[in-house]
Amino acid sequence: MSDTVTVALISSGATMLVPITALLLNYRGFVSVERRIERVEQDMKEFFKLMSTLSAGVARLKDHVGLK
């Protein structure tokens, strides 16, 4: 193989390596964001469950005290 062919192969390989690396890094970033969103959704479900429990408790206290 001549030096020109070797340089051409290395250049084309490097040209392809940059977008492939970018795609892999973006994929990892999106997976990380997706996990965070799932965690936030889970926290929000727990928050709203707690809020409904507290609202029911406040409503019972208001009924007990006579506030409407």
Image (tube, grey):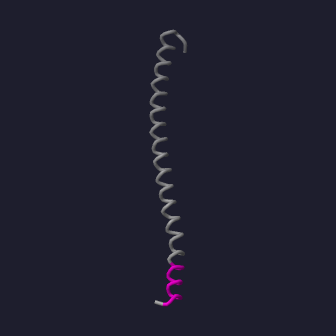
Q: Quadrant of the C terminus?
A: top right
Can you name the residue that lies furthest to the top here? 65
Give whichever of 51, 26 is nearer the camera: 26
Tell me if residue 2 comes above or below residue 68 in the rendering.
below
Tell me if residue 30 comes above or below residue 36 in the rendering.
below
Give whichever of 49, 35 is nearer the camera: 35
Give whichever of 30, 20 is nearer the camera: 20
Q: Where in the figure is residue 43, as x and y percent of width and height?
A: 47, 36
Tell me if residue 38 comes above or below residue 68 in the rendering.
below
Q: Where in the figure is residue 47, as x and y percent of width and height?
A: 48, 32
Decide whether residue 5 is among the magenta residues.
yes
Q: Where in the figure is residue 41, as x and y percent of width and height?
A: 47, 41
Q: Quadrant of residue 49?
A: top left
Give whichever of 3, 22 is nearer the camera: 3
| Secondary structure mostly taken by the magenta-highlighted segment of the chain | helix
Decide whether residue 6 is among the magenta residues.
yes
Q: Where in the figure is residue 29, as x and y percent of width and height?
A: 51, 55
- From which residue to which does the magenta span run? 2-12
Q: Residue at x 53, y 69 (%)?
A: 19
Q: Residue at x 53, y 74 (%)?
A: 14
Q: Residue at x 48, y 59 (%)?
A: 27
Q: Residue at x 53, y 64 (%)?
A: 22
- How many marks do you count on the picture? 0
